[in-house]
Image: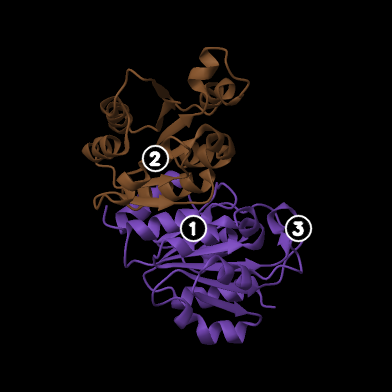
Chain colours: A brown, B purple
Amino acid sequence: MFDGPSVAAALKTCGVTHVVWVPDSVLGQWDSAFSGDPDLALIRVCREGEAVAVAGGLYLGGRRPIVLMQCTGLFEAGDSLRNFIHDLKLPLFFLIGVRSYFAHQQGATTDTCPVFTEPILKAWGLSYVVLERRHSPADLAAAYRDAQAERRAGAALLAE
Amino acid sequence: MMDAGAALEVLAAHRGDHVVVTTMSAVGIWPSLSDTPLDFAYLPSSMGQGPALGLGLALAQPGRGVVVVNGDGCMLMNLGSLVTLANHPADLYLLIFDNGLYEVTGGQPTAGTGHVDFAAMARAAGIGRVYSFDGIDDWRAQAAEVLSGPGPVAAWLRVQGKHGQTTPKPPRPMAEQIERLQRALGM
């Protein structure tokens, strides 16, 4: 079960200092948990490519950010993501909401978001895990820690 | 209208201990004026992301001060960053060098050449401290004020564009730049 307080708690166990985001309808329900947590700074940006760049600056300055966005934002953020994880080689981590994931699995949607999300992550060379209903914030924390331990960028896809 | 190199000389004289992030054409000029570990040539870049990168640095290092030298073409690619800067108070000093050109691709006009008021845009985005400079004397006279005090600050400088330019090269590889910067920041 993913909810704001449990996700915020999991991120803090990883040492995350800043949540940089453009929310979607699922992630957005966590707003009050992040904005009300004195140990997490919530950075609201206007576009997802910008979120990647703010996170890059935070990382360069010694902080531990995570970027939260919808898969549509991932599509928008491609060049920024390419630059910060491949040119600057920063081990940034992303939690990406995949709109219509379950409906797509059931053949019950024409939404193309689930069609392209994983191929695009593969194209950008960004390793990822998929978090479905059986997973918990502890799995998110584990994915974050694994990426940080290996000093590589990574992502977790939140099935929606 | 002022010469971009002369405008950067003024910045070099007043930047103090601020981190200076350069983008595009400024990357080719700045190392001849300053080449310290606190100078970060954002190249290779994602065009338009310089202000956001600078904001992240400024938020991570309160009190340090971060100057971002951004071009008008870069600014137009990410106008929303003005809103983001306004929403997150930090000592970020955004200098918009407006030459009306995509200079590093040879000198083509942008969609905004001649009719965009970046100072008005910055104000409308909610940035409280906004400056506008047409000539080098005014910039020189107010640079110390612009580059001090609480941010965010946006300054719009009209500079002469050059045709026939090519993409500059950063003074050193990115990995080395990052290592120098982080060491200078005490990491």
Q: Nearer the viewer, mark 1 or mark 3?
A: 1
Q: Regarding mark 2 in the picture, which secondary structure is present there?
A: helix
Q: Which residue is mark 2?
A: A29
Q: Regarding mark 1 in the picture, which secondary structure is present there?
A: helix
**B167 and A56: which one is in front?**
A56
Q: Which residue is mark 1?
A: B84
- Percent of width and height locating residue A40: 28, 49
Question: Quick check: do tags 2 and 3 share a chain?
Answer: no
- Percent of width and height locating residue B136: 62, 82
Q: Residues within 10 Å of mark 2 (few under 14, many from 20)?
A: few
- Say which quadrant the N terminus of chain B sits in: bottom right
Q: Are marks 1 and 2 in contact (CB under 8 Å)?
A: no
Q: Is residue A160 above or below residue A45?
A: above
- Percent of width and height locating residue A45: 48, 51
Q: Residues within 10 Å of mark 1 (few under 14, many from 20)?
A: many
CA gap between label 2 and label 3 equals: 38 Å
Measuring 53% from the left and 57% from the top, which residue is drawn there? B81
**B69 and A5: which one is in front?**
A5
Q: Is residue B33 above or below residue A93?
A: below
The amino acid type, in three-letter code, at marker 3 is Ala
Question: Quick check: do tags 1 and 3 share a chain?
Answer: yes
Q: Which residue is mark 3?
A: B111
**B12 and B84: which one is in front?**
B84
Q: Are marks 1 and 3 in contact (CB under 8 Å)?
A: no
CA gap between label 1 and label 3 equals: 22 Å
